[in-house]
Image: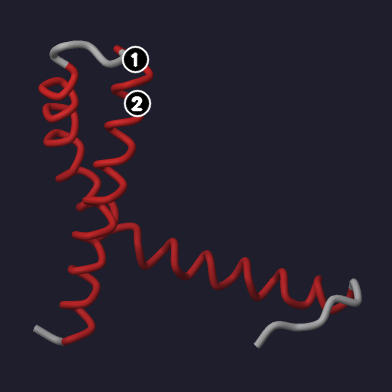
Amino acid sequence: MSTALQTRIAFAFLMSLLMSFLMTFWVSWLNIGFQPDFLGKWRHAFLAAWPVAFVIVVLCGPAVMALSQRVMAWLRPAATRAGCPSQP
């Protein structure tokens, strides 16, 4: 396995872990508040969401990166036309 692929998988693993952890905690808290069984319900939501988030990051990550690069390329000339200094 190439280093680039290993890095992509590690990134997907960590990003999906972080986002699933934070988002399921937040949404669980919004929906049910801190109840005695909050941690169990949150854990269930997290364990259900994390594998899905991992697959989404692996599959959609390259397309999102390409879209981000196109957006930034589009914004840079617009910023230059507006008199903003360019960023390196």
Q: Amino acid at mark 1?
A: Asn
- Residue 69, percent from left and from top: 55, 72
**What residue do we see at 47% from left, 70% from top?**
66
Image marks 2 and 1: residues in contact by CB distance under 8 Å:
yes
- What residue did someone put label 2 on? 27
- Residue 14, percent from left and from top: 22, 60
| SS under mark 2 | helix
State the residue in front, 8 or 38.
Answer: 38
Residue 20 in the figure: left or right of residue 66? left
Question: Crowding near pointer 1: few (<14 within 10 Å), some, many (20+)?
Answer: few
- Vertically, is 58 above or below 42? below
State the residue in front, 45 or 34.
Answer: 34
Q: Amino acid at mark 2?
A: Val
- What residue did someone put label 1 on? 31
- Residue 7 falls in which quadrant of the image? bottom left
User: Which colour style is shown?
Assistant: secondary structure
- Residue 74 falls in which quadrant of the image? bottom right
- Vertically, is 13 above or below 8? above
Question: Crowding near pointer 2: few (<14 within 10 Å), some, many (20+)?
Answer: few
Instruction: Count numbered badges in the picture.
Output: 2
| SS under mark 1 | helix
- Vertically, is 9 above or below 52? below
Residue 16 is marked as none
**What residue do we see at 20% from left, 37% from top?**
49
Quadrant, the N terminus: bottom left
**What residue do we see at 28% from left, 57% from top?**
15
Residue 81 in the figure: left or right of residue 29? right
